[in-house]
Image (cartoon, helix red, strand yellow):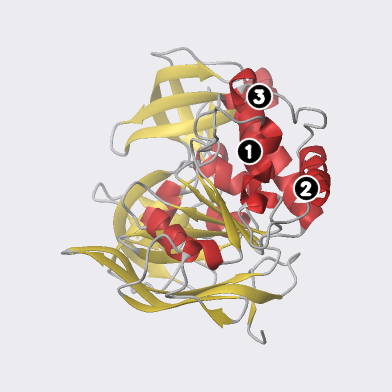
Amino acid sequence: MQSQIDHGAGDQADRPLIAEFRAATKRYGDVLAADALTFGIGAGEFLSFLGPSGCGKTTALRMLAGFETPTSGEVYLDGDRVTDVPAYRRPVNMVFQHYALFPHMTVADNIAYGLMQRRPKPDRADVARKVDRALEMVRLAGFGPRRIWEMSGGQQQRVALARAIVNEPKVLLLDEPLAALDRKLRREMQIELQTLQRQLGITFVLVTHDQEEALSMSDRICIMQGGRIVQSGSPSELYDRPISRYVADFVGKSNFIDGIVSALSATGGQIETPFGQHFQGRVSGALAQGAKATLSIRPEQIGLAHAARAGAEPVTVINRIFLGEHTEYLVRHAALGDLLVLVARQAEAQEGSFAPGDTGHVSWAADSGLILAQD
């Protein structure tokens, strides 16, 4: 296929398309679940759909899988129109949130199930070789004879992955496959998924509402809202240069200060709050002087000090949470309201810690804030 897609990340080469949506729309009665989706997915890319419940991310995945047919528009896989092609005839496999493994079968039989449905039936020795290779890929060599109920949650997740990759799909679809795992195991499986994707070179498409999961694993993320992709880009692009308050609020944590644009220049802008304060920042998107705007500041970009400094704002510490590598403070400003501040452990050791009720002073660099049009 001749079309290519640019990830937007400097270290990502352009890739030929393996999947494409062309004005794909899905309605359930009066409910618009997917609204004229038009975008491509690159071969060998790890792409994530990220958004809250009901935003359309699972509908997009199911249209790609063949479980849903678009009300209008087209879906292509590897250059072929597959809009009306049933799921079992598409070169994709899917890993579900609850794995959908057969409890009465052994691990090996679960993995071989898809292969054994082919016609004509494949050679059993060839199937066994493919199953063993799939088990090695997911670090479960020798587990073939075990029963599913003898496996831990993380092992069952890897069995589901092995069952999906044994068919050598061109696209592997992942529907929140880590949601049932505890935090530590989920992080381990994120690393394993990334490693496996690089080894296989298969396109992975992940649906998740977990922003940390999407940021840590993806080459590119599509942020969805109301059935549409509102912004697409690499994790660093979305985190550093969101185009709206919705994206800034959904990708990572942020503080928001509302006001109007009081000045614009080639290098940035300034907002004025209802209380007469002025804050500078970088500008994202098209803004006009006098327009309503929001200043977004990430918690880790705010400094918290005991002593007053030029340009610092006085605050009262409301809460303190120790998180190991950093401490999270909730502070209250008389005019700006509550602000979230993340202080690195080394910085806190130098400045000294704060307790609820203490008075502190917050400040941030002028170019740390990002001025966004109000949603």
The reply to whether discs 3 and 2 touch (Cβ–Cβ < 8 Å) is: no
In the image, 207 versus 256, the foreground residue is: 207
Q: Would residue 372 be seen by someone viewing this image from the given angle?
A: yes
**Residue 99 in the image, given as x and y percentages of width and height:** 53, 37
In the image, 329 versus 124, the foreground residue is: 124
Q: Would residue 283 be seen by someone viewing this image from the given angle?
A: no
Q: Mark number for residue 110?
A: 1
Q: Residues within 10 Å of mark 3 (few under 14, many from 20)?
A: few
**Residue 78 in the image, given as x and y percentages of width and height:** 62, 76
Q: Is residue 186 above or below residue 79?
A: above
Residue type at mark 3 is: Glu
Q: Residue furthest left?
A: 30
User: Dot 2: what SS?
Assistant: helix
Residue 287 left/right relative to 117: left
Q: Which residue is mark 3?
A: 325
**Residue 333 in the image, given as x and y percentages of width and height:** 34, 32
Q: Is residue 359 above or below residue 250?
A: above
Residue type at mark 2 is: Arg
